Every structure is written in structure tokens, then in C-alpha cells.
Image: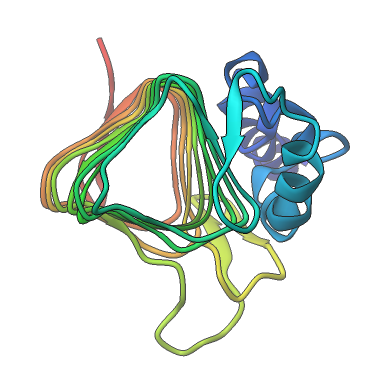
């Protein structure tokens, strides 16, 4: 019974409510009815199409097919944006960024040089500024990925992704699942977030880390098996 109680506590820490401030994204309604954030990954495309059609023409302009860009956003002429996509107010999409589709880039967010996005939600003020790959993932308010850090979104054996925790695994039913990154998380340069990674709020990941499974909120991830609480 005690083990079940511990597992239920961990499951709560993986919920949308514990990981994200939904006031810090234009996509708040995407999470309606969802317990865990990965449940919305299959809904991003349709949500963008519905939301895009309602955006103010005074604040957003439609560019090409199903791409809405805030007039206050800065998009480099060398960036490529494939729809459906929404680029939020005061966002910055830099030189040679590659947005493959199904992407929501939040207000004040930065998508940097040669960064690639696919099926993602970036909350407001997220930074993925240098050579990042972010796929089938959700990044919370002010989350930051250091240069060269990436999300790996498919297992090498192509099996369904599990979220691994110290007290058991949680089935997701998804073949493609990168990382669920909570608010104010710092991911160090050159790190790999393996399929099914969930990083709690206010956590720091050391550079050159290979992360798998759940990392609790308010932690410092030094290496596999060495995770300490922030003081």
C-alpha cells in the first residue's frame, strides 16, 4: 500500500498542473481534459488550425498555408516555417531555423540558428537558441535548452515509449514522445533528453547529460543516478 502511495505521488508530479503554468501559453485550452501533457501531442495540429482561424488580423498575419505569425515577431528571411504553425508576439525565429509543422512558438520565445521544431508547444519566453532539435515535446514557461541539446523522440527499437520512474513505469501509448519540460528548466549544453523524459519545474540539467525518465522538480541532475535537491 505504501508503494502504491509513492507511485501515486510521482504520477501527480507528472501532471499538466504540476509542470506548467497554463496562463503562459496561447495554447492553454489544448490541455483541457488532459491529465498528463503527452496526451495532447496528437492534438496539436488540429488545435493550431482551429486557433489560427480565430487570431486577430490586427495582431497576426497569415503567411502561406496555415502559418500565422504575430506582426511583432521577428522572423529571419532564411528561416523556414511549414504549417500548421503559430509564431507568437515578440517571438524571434533566427537564421536558418527549420519549423517542420505542428508548432506553437510562444510570446517572446527564441528559436535559434539551425534549430529544428516538429510537433511542439513552446510556452512563452522559451529559448531554444542554438542548434537544438525539439520534437514531440512541450517546453514550459522560460524553459531554456543550451547549445546543441536535443530531444530524442523515438526509441531505437521503435517500441512504445514509457515514462520511467524509480517506482515503476508509466505507459504512454506513443511511439513518438520527446520530452515534457517544466517551467523554468535549464538544460545544459550538449545534453540528450531520451524518449519519455519528464523534467520537473525549476530543475537544472548538467551539460553533456543523457537523461531518461522522470527528474523531480527543484533538482540538479548531475548524471544518471546522481540527482540532488536544490538548496
User: Residue visible at 18% across and 40% down?
Assistant: 146
Give the mark count. Answer: 0
User: Residue visible at 65% across and 51% down?
Assistant: 38
- In the drawing, does residue 195 fall left or right of residue 46? left
User: Residue visible at 24% across and 54% down?
Assistant: 78
Q: Would residue 162 be seen by someone viewing this image from the given angle?
A: yes
- In the drawing, does residue 69 fall left or right of residue 173? left
Q: Quadrant of the C terminus?
A: top left
Q: Quadrant of the N terminus?
A: top right
Image: 75 above or below 21: below
User: Residue 81, image x and y in percent?
Assistant: 44, 55
- In the drawing, does residue 193 fall left or right of residue 190? right
182 or 102: nearer the viewer:
102
221 or 16: nearer the viewer:
16
Image: 47 above or below 216: below
- Outermost residue, right direction? 33
User: Residue visible at 27% across and 17% down?
Assistant: 230
- Outermost residue, bottom direction? 157
160 or 52: nearer the viewer:
52
Q: Would residue 123 be seen by someone viewing this image from the given angle?
A: no
Q: Quadrant of residue 177?
A: bottom right
User: Residue 207, image x and y in percent?
Assistant: 11, 43
Image: 112 above or below 78: above
Q: Quadrant of residue 215?
A: top left
User: Residue 55, image x and y in percent?
Assistant: 72, 28
Amino acid at each position: 500500500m505504501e508503494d502504491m502511495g509513492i507511485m501515486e505521488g510521482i504520477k501527480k508530479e507528472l501532471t499538466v498542473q504540476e509542470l506548467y503554468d497554463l496562463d503562459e501559453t496561447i495554447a492553454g485550452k489544448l490541455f483541457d481534459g488532459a491529465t498528463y501533457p503527452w496526451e495532447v501531442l496528437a492534438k496539436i495540429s488540429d488545435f493550431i488550425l482551429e486557433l489560427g482561424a480565430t487570431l486577430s488580423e490586427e495582431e497576426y498575419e497569415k503567411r502561406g498555408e496555415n502559418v500565422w505569425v504575430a506582426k511583432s515577431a521577428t522572423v529571419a528571411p532564411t528561416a523556414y516555417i511549414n504549417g500548421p504553425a503559430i509564431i507568437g508576439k515578440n517571438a524571434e525565429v533566427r537564421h536558418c531555423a527549420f519549423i517542420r509543422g505542428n508548432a506553437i512558438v510562444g510570446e517572446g520565445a527564441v528559436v535559434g540558428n539551425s534549430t529544428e521544431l516538429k510537433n511542439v508547444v513552446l510556452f512563452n519566453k522559451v529559448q531554444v537558441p542554438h542548434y537544438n532539435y525539439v520534437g514531440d515535446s512541450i517546453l514550459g514557461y522560460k524553459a531554456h535548452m543550451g547549445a546543441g541539446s536535443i530531444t530524442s523522440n523515438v526509441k531505437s527499437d521503435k517500441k512504445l515509449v514509457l515514462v520511467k520512474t524509480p517506482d515503476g513505469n508509466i505507459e504512454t501509448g506513443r511511439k513518438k514522445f520527446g520530452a515534457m519540460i517544466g517551467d523554468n528548466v535549464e538544460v545544459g549544453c550538449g545534453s540528450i533528453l531520451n524518449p519519455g523524459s519528464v523534467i520537473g519545474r525549476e530543475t537544472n540539467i548538467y551539460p553533456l547529460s543523457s537523461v531518461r525518465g522522470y527528474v523531480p522538480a527543484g533538482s540538479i541532475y548531475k548524471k544518471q543516478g546522481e540527482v540532488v535537491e536544490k538548496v
